[in-house]
Image (cartoon, rainbow, N blue to C red):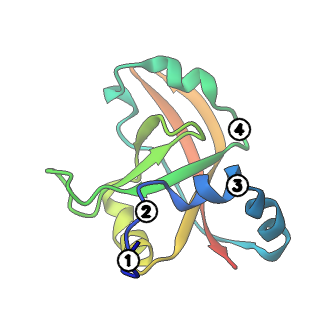
Amino acid sequence: MGTELTIAEKNTLTTLTTHSLGEVLKPLTNEIHLFDTYVAGTSHIKDETVFDTIKDGDTLVLQREPENRFDENAILVLNSEGRKLGYIPEKDNIVFTRLMDAGKLLTAKIDHMEPRGSFREINIKIYLVDF
């Protein structure tokens, strides 16, 4: 076993919330509200059953997707099971991309949801998780 650093494949938030250490750290964390926005691209989700798994107040996972061919600053929005809901809108993602690339943990919470024709309007609040 070497001493080199490696990038974990698992999302940090998932690791913290599914590990017993997450329960120890919870009282030591502070969520700082940064911004209100919405989830973009919900009309492109092929398996719409993912929308049945979320409700107002749920915490969502934000994950960088730098290999996205349309937007190098893309940030995926995932439910707690890691299923894709959409993206942070391109017009809003540059600051959050910089924070995440600097190692900051960001999450989102669903503020309000409702169907709007061919897409789901999911309004979210973005938070910086401070330890």
Q: Residue 31: give x, y in percent of width and height.
A: 71, 70
Q: Nearer the viewer, mark 1 or mark 4?
A: 1
Give neighbour class at mark 2: few <14, some 14-19, many 20+ (Cα, 10 Å). Answer: few
Q: CA distance from mark 1 to mark 4?
A: 44 Å
- Which structural element holds mark 4? loop
Q: Contact, CB < 8 Å: mark 3 with mark 4? A: no
Q: CA distance from mark 1 to mark 2?
A: 15 Å
Q: Residue 124: give x, y in percent of width and height.
A: 58, 50
Mark 1 belongs to which amino acid? Gly
The image shows residue 90, relative to residue 38, as above or below, that is: below
Q: Contact, CB < 8 Å: mark 4 with mark 2? A: no
Q: Which residue is mark 1?
A: 2
Q: Nearer the viewer, residue 1 or 31?
A: 1
Q: Can residue 118 be seen in this snapshot?
A: yes
- Which structural element holds mark 3? loop
Q: CA distance from mark 4 to mark 2?
A: 30 Å
Earlier in the chain: of badge 2 and badge 3, it is: 2
Q: Residue 6: give x, y in percent of width and height.
A: 37, 71
Q: Nearer the viewer, residue 109 or 16?
A: 16
Q: Contact, CB < 8 Å: mark 1 with mark 4? A: no
Q: Which residue is mark 2?
A: 8
Q: CA distance from mark 2 to mark 3?
A: 15 Å
Earlier in the chain: of badge 4 and badge 2, it is: 2
Give the quarter of the image for residue 8. bottom left
Earlier in the chain: of badge 1 and badge 4, it is: 1
Q: Which residue is mark 4?
A: 56
Q: CA distance from mark 3 to mark 4?
A: 25 Å
- Which structural element holds mark 2? loop
Q: Is residue 101 left or right of residue 124?
A: left
Q: Which residue is mark 3?
A: 19
